[in-house]
Amino acid sequence: MSNVSITTLMQKKQAGEKFAVVTCYDASFAQLVEKAGIEAILVGDSLGMVLQGHDSTLPVTVADMAYHTAAVARGCKAPLVIADMPFGSYHSLEPCLNGATELMRAGAQMVKLEGGTWLCDSIQQLVRAGIPVCGHLGLTPQSVNVLGGYRVQGREESQAAVIMKDAKALQAAGASMLVLECVPTALAADISAELEIPVIGIGAGPATDAQVLVLHDLLGVTQKTARFVRNFAADGVSIEEALCLYRQSVIDGSFPAAEHCFD
Ligand code: KIV
Ligand code: NA
């Protein structure tokens, strides 16, 4: 596979072809993810929970993210590498630009930030500085203490309207992609249809342009998982096969199935 760029992913959206994204935190797994043809890797701050054993993503630092981003970037060439900006690293402009620069130097090709319209100025500045941005709306785990738990967002009409408005604002500010986490299927379908940029869903139903899962969840390593997770490594399937099966299921639309979605 040739190197994936945001142009590649935009063209897929325009052609109605889905693509797969998975989280990854190290070089060895990045190599396997690449071998499976998965289009993009998210070095997620979920590493705070999955690798570090914290009960939220809040303790993760820019240095942690840079360390894992560099490891992933050494392990693969083709997938687009997106790195999460961690909690507290982007609420004011200068730390945001410095942190994002560090992640790009470490090997990211895009950074991801959680939040709505309040991020628009930062997104403009990042893009101007040569740093592509992925937004993240719906359930934003860095705000778990404000949200009062890990739960579906946008079920009420007024809340859904805010998420739609935020999505359009992020795109207008220059975001290249958007993650939607734990929102009703219908809302994710509307936003995916409305936006020109690719929308990547997790617990957001089958109508988004792409899907993302946490690597350890789709490999069945995680003990307690959410409704939207499928273990692709069940029944003695190898890691390599599981990654291929995940990508194939996203592309042919068989994942997510109804049992993985929210109304
Ligand atoms: O950190 C992460 O793994 C994420 C995905 C779940 C979207 O942000
Ligand atoms: Na994240």
Image (cartoon, rainbow, N blue to C red):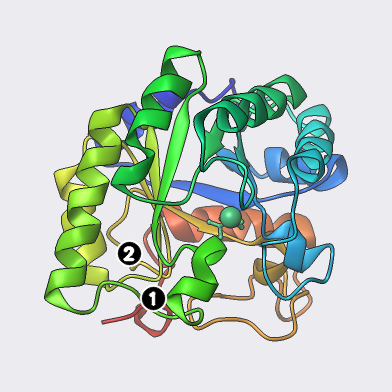
**Residue 67 found in image quarter:** top right
Indicate whether 192 appears above or below 104. below
Q: Is residue 189 visible?
A: no
Residue 256 percent coordinates (x, y): 42, 70
Tags 1 and 2 in contact by the CB under 8 Å rule?
yes
Amino acid at dot 1: Ala
The residue under the point 37% across, 23% down is: 124
Residue 84 percent coordinates (x, y): 61, 44
Classify mark 2: residues with Cα within 10 Å, few (<14), some (14-19) or many (20+).
Answer: many
Residue 126 percent coordinates (x, y): 47, 23
**Residue 127 found in image quarter:** top left
Residue at which label 1 appears: 257
The residue under the point 57% across, 32% down is: 96
Q: Is residue 73 found left or right of 128 in the rendered image? A: right
Say whether disc 1 or disc 2 marks the residue closer to the N-terminus: 2
Secondary element at tag 2: loop
Identify the image quadrant of the C terminus: bottom left
Identify the image quadrant of the N terminus: top right
Residue 204 percent coordinates (x, y): 36, 67
> Which residue occupies the foreground of this view, 12 or 85?
85
Residue at which label 2 appears: 206
Amino acid at dot 2: Pro
Quarter of the rendered structure image containing ligand 2: bottom right
Q: Is residue 123 visible?
A: yes
The residue under the point 32% across, 26% down is: 174
Indicate whether 134 appears above or below 149. above
